[in-house]
Image: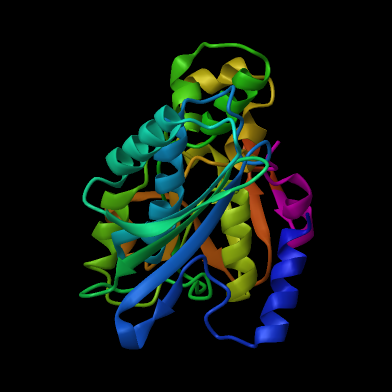
Amino acid sequence: MKEKEFINIIKSVLNSSYIGDDCAYLKKSGIVITQDNLVENIHFRRDFMTPYQLGWKSAMVNISDICASGAKPSCLTVGLSLPADIDEDFVREFYKGLKDASDGVEIVGGDITGADKIFISVAAIGSAEGRMISSRKNAKAGQKIIISGLHGSSAAGLRLLMKGEKEPQKFISAHLMPGAQTEFSEKIALNIKEDYAMMDTSDGLMDAISQIADASGVNIEIDFSKIPFDEDLKMFEDYEDLILFGGEDYGLVASVSEEFARDFTVIGEVKEGSGVTLIGDNNVRKHFSKSDVEEKIFKHF
């Protein structure tokens, strides 16, 4: 599916100022809202994860989007479409996972229907009260790029699952039960005074950086050696690609002023121009256009 092309069509038809970020910021209402769908055998496989883990991840991917906006996650609604072979135990464990992942974020409603396979649609609402809300359009030359979370671990976990392997378990856990970067989000949104850009890395670190660069009309220069990752990823020959293009780590990447960035992990800076410039070994620079990144970004099953 050509997701980005479809989004562009929808934007042109609706002509809505709200479409563009992962969350819509309804300023007059003081909230942000987002929605994500998970489809069996595209976003997940039942033989890879328990119902509890599926519920956990279904909640967390939406909470991560709220965190990426800078808002405080407050409530979820859940739409669940289930095939005939699903039993009561599945539903019970699924909602236990949802509830535990939500921890302080209330599940307030939803819908259940029949289907030929599992479809999950979660909508999340966050409070913008007392917080500066981000937009991927806000990056400006001179700002620094800061990051949270380890990158590449989830993609490594998915690869292990696809190969029928169970170790290292930490990579599989990173894929099946991710954690949203709530503290990082809160530290920025409650304290920053200027506009800033922020996204989660659900579709890969390079995708998030590229989307911020494109929406803001800037070049973002990244130093690979400063990206945080688990050293055990080096067991994979292509670990650098896992770090850059592997998805579903649910870290956060943001563009903030140099002064504000001092308390965070800085991996690069914003410059005039376009696209993403990656600094590798021996200070070798490689430029990626938007289309270059889209050719390599994370794809589900």
Residue 263 % position (x, y): 27, 53
Q: Nearer the viewer, residue 230 or 167?
A: 167
Residue 171 % position (x, y): 49, 23
Q: Nearer the viewer, residue 116 or 56?
A: 116
Q: Nearer the viewer, residue 5 or 51?
A: 51
Q: Relative to residue 295, is residue 270 depicted above or below?
A: below
Taking the spot 38% from the left edge, 72% from the top edge, the residue there is: 32
In the image, residue 292 lies in the stretch drawn in magenta: yes
Q: Nearer the viewer, residue 183 or 216?
A: 183
Taking the spot 64% from the left edge, 49% from the top edge, the residue there is: 278
Total labels: the figure holds: 0
Residue 183 % position (x, y): 26, 50
The residue range painted magenta reads: 286-301
In the image, residue 221 lies in the stretch drawn in magenta: no
Q: Quadrant of the C terminus?
A: top right
Residue 232 visible from this viewpoint: yes
Q: Quadrant of the N terminus?
A: bottom right
